[in-house]
Image (cartoon, rainbow, N blue to C red):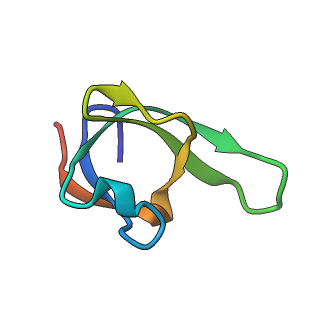
């Protein structure tokens, strides 16, 4: 995943976004653990989601080149 990709969020974790797509704006890596995880800034309905979202909570819909 990268900035510009379209995603759908996990319906269990984010039921308020049912049927909506998000646009990845950017990312950052959390390093406190031994296995770094990538988290994403996602825009939904023209608004930036207030928290970063984990890769495991998203499905890639359309990748940019």
Q: Residue at x 35, y 48 (%)?
A: 1
Position in image of residue 56 (x %, y %): 48, 65
Above or below for 3 versus 7: above
Extreme residue toward the bottom, this view: 12
62 left or right of 38 in image: left
59 left or right of 26 in image: left
Position in image of residue 64 (x %, y %): 17, 38
Above or below for 10 versus 62: below
Q: Residue at x 21, y 51 (%)?
A: 20
Q: Residue at x 71, y 45 (%)?
A: 30
Q: Residue at x 73, y 62 (%)?
A: 35
Position in image of residue 45 (x %, y %): 25, 34
State the residue in front, 2 or 16.
Answer: 16
61 left or right of 36 in image: left
Count how many numbered circles sit on residues in the image.
0
- Kindly indicate the quadrant of the structure image that contains residue 46: top left
Extreme residue toward the front, this view: 16
Above or below for 53 versus 4: below
Quadrant (top left, top right, bottom left, bottom right) of the C terminus = top left
Position in image of residue 8 (x %, y %): 27, 57
């Amino acid at each position: 995943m990268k900035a510009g990709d379209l995603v759908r969020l996990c319906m269990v974790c984010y039921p308020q976004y049912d049927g909506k797509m998000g646009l990845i704006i950017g990312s950052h890596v959390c390093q406190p653990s031994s296995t770094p995880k990538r988290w994403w800034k996602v825009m939904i309905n023209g608004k930036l989601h207030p928290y970063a979202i984990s890769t495991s909570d998203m499905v890639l819909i359309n990748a940019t080149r």
